[in-house]
Image (tube, helix red, strand yellow):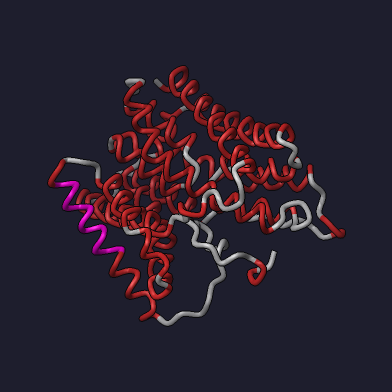
Amino acid sequence: MKNQHRPALPAAADLYGDLEPAPVVRWQDYGPGLILATLATLAAAYLSERYGAPLTLMALLVGLALNFLSADQRLAPGLAFASRTLLRWGIVLVGARITLGQIVDLGPAAFAAIVLILALTLLSGVGIARLLGFGAAFGALAGGAVAICGASAALAIATVLGEKRAGQGQLTLVLVGISAASSLAMVAYPLIAHQLAMGDKAAGFMLGASIHDVAQALGAGYSYSAPAGEIATIAKLSRVALLAPVLAAIAWFFPAEDGRKAKFAGLPWFVVGFFGLAALNSTGIVPAFVNHAADDGAAALLACAVTATGIRSPMQTLMAGGPRPLLVIAGATLVALALSIAAAMLLVG
């Protein structure tokens, strides 16, 4: 799929930078959007400190309150940079909070559960799509976006499927629906975890294994607690790391059109950076003040990314393509949530 054929939609948490055309911009063009995101994040930080609310939750709410500003194209480069590049680097710095021992503590059973949840969520998308009269390819597109990493996975899957199987209208609807569903999940899922009286580890696993986009998964995790946020990060990035094998499987089930070879992305660099920094932190050679600085930096970058994500979220166009295709996203989302809760209660809690 070529960039010039893609719709110019704002997309929350565009991790790979491939959902939107990348126009040439000057460095000063980033200023207005970055200034807005920074000021909004500072306002969220004040509200968080003043009322004792989680910073990331306040950042999301402030961002959504300023969503109307996304119509100003002067803000677009800076907001895109904040919600995309700052998010990536924030994820890398989160690695300084985590050791490989914590990753191992999650356990092989929990990782196997993540793989199973991912597979069943994707297959449920295909099944629900077929029941509603859509093709299996659209089900794989919607189910895969829910199962792996939201909008970025949707574009990667659409690239493998080809435009004949996953048209621009379907892709656009999935991008909008997945962004809205992920924003809603960031607010609603921690409340569900509280209602179920989940511990930090179980809640972090559930949030990381079920929420669509990385920014919202991390935001939900850290809004629950810092330990839950760390577990949510591990669980979520484990799902992201499975993107390449899932795309390979989709390419096998859906042979390329017109004799062309299917293309799919490798392991994202920010995932490699996250686990690399966690490995370095596990050695014990990183000074405490460096860990604290990285911790503060990660919190600031993630809060700013979540704020920008809220400003850019295309919530107002959710129903533009009609409700029936969105039922596929909703159904796969409920499957992922139910399976994640079950796995968290049985294996982690």
Specify whether 35 is left or right of 160: left
**Who's the residue at 81% across and 54% down the image?**
256
**Residue 139, quarter of the rendered image:** top right
Reply above or below: 119 against 195: below
Q: Mainly helix, strand or loop, the magenta region?
A: helix
Q: How many labels, in total?
A: 0
Q: In this rendered view, identify the residue nearer to me: 188 or 286.
A: 188
Reply above or below: 130 against 87: above
Q: Position of residue 257 (x, y in %)?
A: 83, 56
Q: Position of residue 173 (x, y in %)?
A: 60, 51
Specify whether 262 is left or right of 15: right
Q: Position of residue 160 (x, y in %)?
A: 72, 53
- Magenta residues span 37-49
Q: In this rendered view, identify the residue nearer to me: 239 or 73.
A: 73
Q: In this rendered view, identify the residue nearer to me: 187 or 254.
A: 187
Q: Position of residue 207 (x, y in %)?
A: 42, 34
The quadrant in which the N terminus is found is bottom right
Reply above or below: 222 against 256: above
Asked whether residue 237 is in view, the answer is: no
Asked whether residue 290 is in view, the answer is: yes
**Who's the residue at 35% across and 70% down the image?**
33
